[in-house]
Image (cartoon, helix red, strand yellow):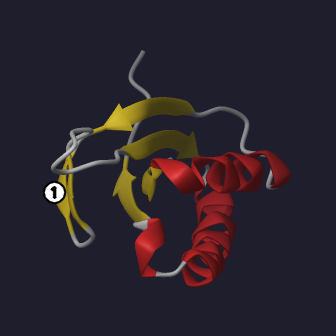
Amino acid sequence: MKLLLIFVDADHASAVEDLLDRLGVPGYSQIPTVLGKGDTGRKLGTRAFPGSSTLYFAAVAPEHAAALVEQVRELQQACGPEGGLKMYELETTEVV
């Protein structure tokens, strides 16, 4: 199994959800308001540093991961740098 972590600017979160649904990802979790600092600057939900990111977790079979990575790359190009779209992949094992 692969655990995919997808970070995206909250303003572009619906595009990631559409992608996950379109590709038939069987399930995912979402943290809708993620605050922090990254390539696109600070997003702290304040007047000084407005905005936030959204984080998606999905545990998928390796063959689903490969297709998803390709589609997220295309979405990243479409959103541009302001979309703050990043994806990480970890090997994982379901233990319970």
Amino acid under disc 1: Lys
As drawn, 12 above or below 27:
below
**Which image quadrant is residue 38 in?**
bottom left
At 63% from the left and 73% from the top, the residue drawn is 75
Find disc 1 in the rendering and name its residue.
37
- Residue 33's spot in the image, x, y percent? 37, 33
As drawn, 42 above or below 51:
below
As drawn, 23 above or below 59:
below
Camera-nearest residue between 54 and 29: 54
Relative side of 21 to 40, left or right? right
At 57% from the left and 78% from the top, the residue drawn is 73
Relative side of 23 to 6, left or right? right
Secondary structure beneath label 1: strand
- Residue 15's spot in the image, x, y percent? 68, 56
At 64% from the left and 64% from the top, the residue drawn is 68
On-image quarter of the C terminus: top left
As drawn, 27 above or below 70:
above
